[in-house]
Image: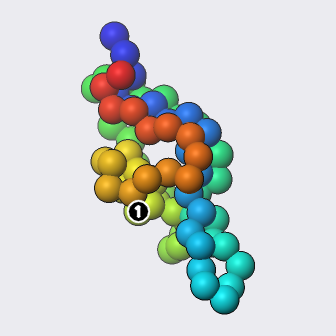
Amino acid sequence: MPPAIELTQLSKTYAKRGSPPLQAVADLNLTVPPGQVIGFLDPNGAGKTTTIKMICGLVEPTTGHARLNG
């Protein structure tokens, strides 16, 4: 059975005009088997929401892949 969630080298960098780029997520690898419950715990601004949006397809990763159900 394929993983429920598979993240491979997932990164997101936001370009900011007049400022250095902001790397929200860097080279994240994660495999979640079917039926597994997970949570993201990190300080504010650590990339939790960006990661979830990439998993759901709402934000395009800068590099890497996010796959749901294979």
Q: Quadrant of residue 24?
A: bottom right
Pointer 1 local density, CA inside 10 Å: few below 14, some 14–19, many at least 20: some
- Reading the image, the residue beneath label 1 is 49
The answer to whether 56 appears left or right of 6 in the picture is left
The residue furthest top is: 1
Answer left or right for 55 relative to 12: left
Q: Residue 18 appears in which quarter of the rendering?
A: bottom right
| Image side of residue 25 versus residue 34, left or right | right
Query: Is 42 above or below relative to 54?
Result: below
In the displayed structure, would residue 18 be above or below residue 43? below
Residue 50 x/y as whole percent: 44, 61
Q: Is residue 42 visible?
A: no
Q: Residue at x 56, y 40 (%)?
A: 64
Furthest-front residue in this view: 17
Residue nearest the observer in this picture, 11 or 16? 16
SS category of the residue bearing label 1: helix
- The coloring applied to the image is rainbow
Of residues 27 and 34, the one drawn nearer to the viewer in this rendering = 27
Percent across and percent down for residue 70 are 35, 22
From this view, report whether residue 56 is shown above or below residue 67: below
Residue at left offset 41%, top offset 62%: 49
Which residue is situated farthest in the bottom direction here?
A: 18
Residue drawn where x is 59% and y is 80% of the image: 16
- Check the picture and name the quadrant holding the N terminus: top left
**Residue visible at 33% across and 37% down?**
37
Q: With respect to residue 6, does 46 lie above or below?
A: below
Amino acid found under the numbered disc labelled 1? Thr
Instruction: Work out whether residue 25 can be spotted.
Output: yes
